[in-house]
Image (tube, rainbow, N blue to C red):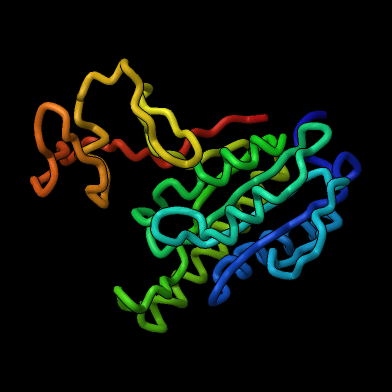
């Protein structure tokens, strides 16, 4: 048998999280409970606990919030501090965000760092949880927040189940092939056709063209039924 299917194949799971108001811990705790129901030995700790990473684990899991459309600095620093694994190790990365539009490049940031540390990221996904960024937005009413928490818990259980059953899934932006991500930032290749997908798709209007024309401050356009953001690419290990 292949994949992460039976407890006698894989015993130890190492889980790490960071959060400010409890979202990421809630998601990872739900996943931990599912793993334990299936007889996995699970260790969970905050990255601020200064607890060493167990390099002997068979699977590593990380859950972080999204700050400013990326991973928080403390999370990037932690991932970069991990030792390079002697042999390729399976890992998953989950982020919590107030909405799907806020995910940005958070997952790509994390996956790129993990790959450099010789982790094989078999699963990456975002879970919608109540927003806590009160300086610039309103937190949801308690009844709506509770609905987010319940849906988030359901999704966490599904993610854990998928991982245990060897399903590989990656939530990702449908990046044109002429764009590559280096050190968490997009780089345009000479093959760019100036199709304007990236400029018009960016929710934050953060991509500008300055060579041969200006795009800053202009209205963006996407045909209403065109979906440059795909939900996921899903395969079986």
Quadrant in which the N terminus appears: top right
Q: Residue at x 64, y 35 (%)?
A: 115
- On the image, the x and y values in percent for residue 85 come to 79, 38
Q: Where is residue 127 drawn, in percent x and y?
A: 50, 58
Q: Residue at x 56, y 46 (%)?
A: 110
Asked whether residue 166 is in view, the answer is no
Note whether 117 is above or below 158 in the view shown: above
Q: Residue at 40% x, 65% y: name it.
A: 98
Judge left or right: residue 88 versus residue 220. Answer: right
What is the quadrant of residue 26 in the picture? bottom right
Toward the viewer: 25 or 225? 25
Place residue 211 in its image quadrant.
Answer: top left
Q: Measuring 77% from the left and 44% from the top, which residue is drawn there?
A: 83
User: Percent from the top left, x then y, of residue 159?
Assistant: 61, 50
Which image quadrant: the C terminus? top right
Q: Does the image show residue 181?
A: yes
């Amino acid at each position: 048998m292949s994949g992460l299917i039976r407890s006698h194949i894989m015993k130890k799971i190492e889980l790490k999280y960071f959060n400010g108001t409890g979202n990421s811990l809630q998601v990872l705790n739900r996943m931990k409970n599912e793993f334990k129901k299936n007889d996995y030995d699970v260790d969970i700790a905050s990255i601020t606990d200064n607890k060493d990473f167990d390099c002997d684990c068979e699977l590593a899991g990380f859950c972080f919030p999204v700050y400013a459309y990326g991973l928080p600095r403390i999370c990037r620093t932690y991932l970069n501090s991990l030792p390079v694994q002697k042999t390729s190790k399976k890992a998953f990365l989950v982020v919590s965000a107030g909405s799907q539009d806020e995910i940005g490049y958070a997952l790509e940031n994390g996956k790129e760092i993990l790959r450099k540390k010789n982790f094989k990221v078999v699963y990456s996904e975002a879970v919608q949880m109540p927003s806590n960024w009160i300086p610039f937005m309103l937190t949801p009413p308690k009844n709506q927040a509770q609905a987010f928490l319940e849906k988030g818990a359901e999704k966490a259980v599904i993610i854990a189940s998928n991982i245990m059953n060897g399903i590989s899934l990656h939530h990702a932006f449908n990046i044109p092939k002429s764009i590559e991500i280096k050190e968490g930032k997009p780089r345009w290749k000479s093959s760019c056709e100036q199709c304007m997908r990236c400029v018009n798709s960016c929710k934050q209007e953060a991509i500008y063209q300055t060579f041969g024309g200006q795009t800053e401050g202009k209205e963006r356009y996407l045909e209403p039924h065109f979906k440059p953001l795909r939900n996921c690419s899903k395969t079986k290990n």
